[in-house]
Image (cartoon, rainbow, N blue to C red):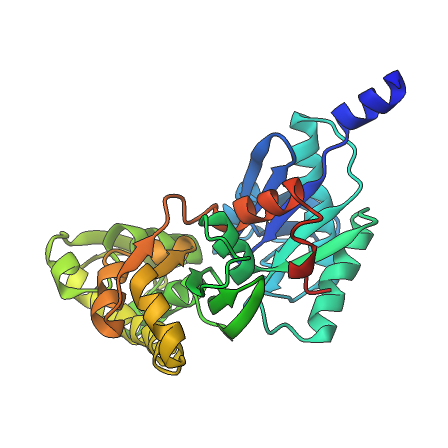
Amino acid sequence: MALSLIKNLIKQDVAIDLGTANSLIYLQREGIVLNEPTVIAGNSLGEPVAVGRKAKAYLGKTPPGMIVKRPMKAGAVDDVDAVSIYLRQIVEMARSRSPVLSSKVVICVPSKLTQVEKRAVLDAAEDAGFKKVYLLEEAMAAAIGAGVDVSDKRPSMVVDMGGGTTEVAVISQMAYLVSESRRIGGNDFDEALCSFMLRKYGLRIGPNTAERLKWEMGAATEEEAQALSSCRVGGQDVARQIPAVVDVTPHEILGCLSPLVKEIGLVIQDVFHDLDGHVKREVESNGIYLTGGSSLLRGFDSYLHKMVGVRVNRVENPLETVVLGAGKVLSAFKSYFAVFSN
């Protein structure tokens, strides 16, 4: 009995939100213990040099002999070997803070993944040392993490805006009435800003600078943009091949991001307008639950409210909602067994 008690104390199952931009790890009974960028740096031999924040610091300014990459692309595995190494490294980081054993892992993935893409995630997790791997779609995890009773007959609508994908789902009785996934997210905002700065100012900026610009000056509405001030952006003048600095206005950033904001809004609007009458009325009554890091773009909730005509409930911790939902699944595993996609 004593041995069994000890095993129960040290065994903690794991939930992972394997995101395009960031990955989070949740340990059973402890909560979120790690939040790191999904970036890996390796040498010319393919050996890992750094992962997470340390690797991300090299993006846009990679030293000779080093390869820096995001192993996830638009929510799918872009490089199985790199994802395997990345998973192994971040799990070791998490366990170094709390050394535990694990019998199973729940990994959150976008919906609409092909069987080949799901197999790639499973292979990466198994290569990282996990024996029992369960895939949980991000929209379902986000709904659970947002406090939605997904077993209820009454449908609820959730939108999860991540780095690589935007997930839109209407959920009832642990199943999707509607599920839509588009490979567009926060990373597309960053890439649009890089392209804009190069086209408008002949200034090459790296992804880290673009991300900073997005959070410091990005907005979804004119009202939000008007409340912001211009800022100075540094990069490489491509014509003269020297460092340069330019002043950029919030209105320029708004114009750059607006097409992407509208594209995401139209996906959500189309899903809502295509709902059956009684389902639409339930969503109108409950509102749309908005989660995911990219939903933090200033004014996106009010933009979506005006576009769709439905109250938008922005969750308290949008960056953590998906992994918190997966953590809830771990704590009541048998009750949620129907939600797994593999």
Image quarter hosting the N terminus: top right
Residue 327 position within the rendered picture, expressed as x and y whole percent measured from the top left: 60, 43
* Residue 115 located left or right of residue 250: right
Answer above or below: position of 287 versus 64: below
Question: Is residue 44 at all visible to an observer of this figure?
Answer: no
Point out the residue furthest to the top here.
2
Residue 174 position within the rendered picture, expressed as x and y whole percent measured from the top left: 58, 61
Foreground of the two, 130 or 139: 139
Q: Residue at x 62, y 51 (%)?
A: 40
Answer above or below: position of 5 versus 176: above
Foreground of the two, 145 or 300: 145
* Residue 323 located left or right of residue 208: right
Question: Is residue 152 at all visible to an observer of this figure?
Answer: yes
Foreground of the two, 87 or 180: 180
Residue 196 position within the rendered picture, expressed as x and y whole percent measured from the top left: 30, 71
Residue 15 position within the rendered picture, expressed as x and y whole percent measured from the top left: 64, 45
Q: How many marks?
A: 0
Answer above or below: position of 274 versus 38: below
Foreground of the two, 45 or 327: 327
Q: Residue at x 43, y 66 (%)?
A: 185
Q: Residue at x 71, y 61 (%)?
A: 121
Instruction: Identify the image quadrant of residue 159.
Output: bottom left
* Residue 322 located left or right of residue 80: left
Image quarter hosting the C terminus: bottom right
Instruction: Identify the image quadrant of residue 205.
Output: bottom left
Q: Residue at x 42, y 68 (%)?
A: 188
